Amino acid sequence: MKRITSYIPNTITCGNLLSGCMAVIFTFQDRFDVAALFILLAAICDFLDGLAARVLKAYSPMGKELDSLADLVSFGIAPGMMVWSLLDGFTLFPYWFKELSYIALLIPVAGALRLAKFNTDTRQTTSFRGLPIPANALFWIGICLFDNTATWHPLLIPALVVVFSYLMVSELPMFSLKVSSLSWRANKLRYILIAGSLALIAWYGTAGFAGAIVLYILLSIIDDITNLCSKSSNTRV
């Protein structure tokens, strides 16, 4: 029985990978809505495989590597292809803009670097350094589904690609959504993020995912500044 249960987390991770592959297929069919749903399904699988591994005590080096490979496809390649397709469809802009669309490939490249860094960085057990790759994918879901080519400046999305790719490989401290208790004091930022994200999604629909990730980044920056000020104050005392 124990042997059978040990396969459950990896099976869920394979669901993550398959969802990412389906997202890529639907992206090339210009079905961003369906592609986004598969990326969201991949995110659910990504949460459940870790939960299953903890509950069943079924950790393994193979599971860790498989999880990273699945995440690269679902949260790196899939959103990267969505952004490339979005930029490639901007037909009203100068001819050189077609070439600029390949900047979207920074998303999977930075995602791969982010995952490799995460797997080898012992500091990221309870918090993160840099924007997690699933969060980056959710941001791009919001952008791609919100798209109205009459709204965007032609250089805005490429600029966002550069900024968010940098954030993934940066040293910016970001809090994790993992909780050890339900107390307000210990989870204040998490509760604010959840409430704010639900409000943004309720108001803006799927475009609210982009706002939710921006809120996550801002709250993490505020938390980092607060911690630095607290440490500075304690040192002076």
Image (cartoon, grey):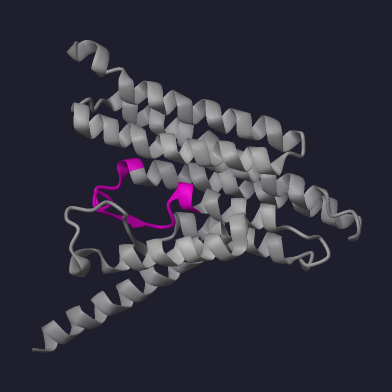
**Quarter of image, res 45:** top left
Q: Position of residue 13 (x, y in %)?
A: 41, 28
Q: Decide if residue 139 is on the left or right side of residue 215.
A: right
Foreground pick, 8 / 224: 8
Image height of 100 relative to 31, above or below = below
Query: Which residue is found at the position 33% from the left and 55% from the top?
Result: 128
- The answer to whether residue 211 of the structure is visible from this angle is no
Q: Residue furthest bottom?
A: 237
Image height of 139 relative to 6, above or below = below
Q: Decide if residue 213 is on the left or right side of residue 2.
A: right
Quadrant assignment for the C terminus: bottom left
Query: Which residue is found at the position 26% from the left and 12% from the top?
Result: 4
Foreground pick, 209 / 71: 209
Q: Decide if residue 134 is on the left or right side of residue 141.
A: left
Query: Which residue is found at the position 70% from the left and 43% from the top?
Result: 32
**Quarter of image, res 224:** bottom left
Image height of 128 relative to 21, above or below = below
Image height of 71 relative to 98, above or below = above
Query: Which residue is found at the position 63% from the left and 44% from the top?
Result: 80
Q: Which residues are magenta?
A: 119-135
| Magenta run includes residue 131 | yes
Q: Position of residue 81 (x, y in %)?
A: 67, 41
Q: Residue furthest front?
A: 202
Quadrant assignment for the N terminus: top left
Q: Decide if residue 237 is on the left or right side of residue 163.
A: left
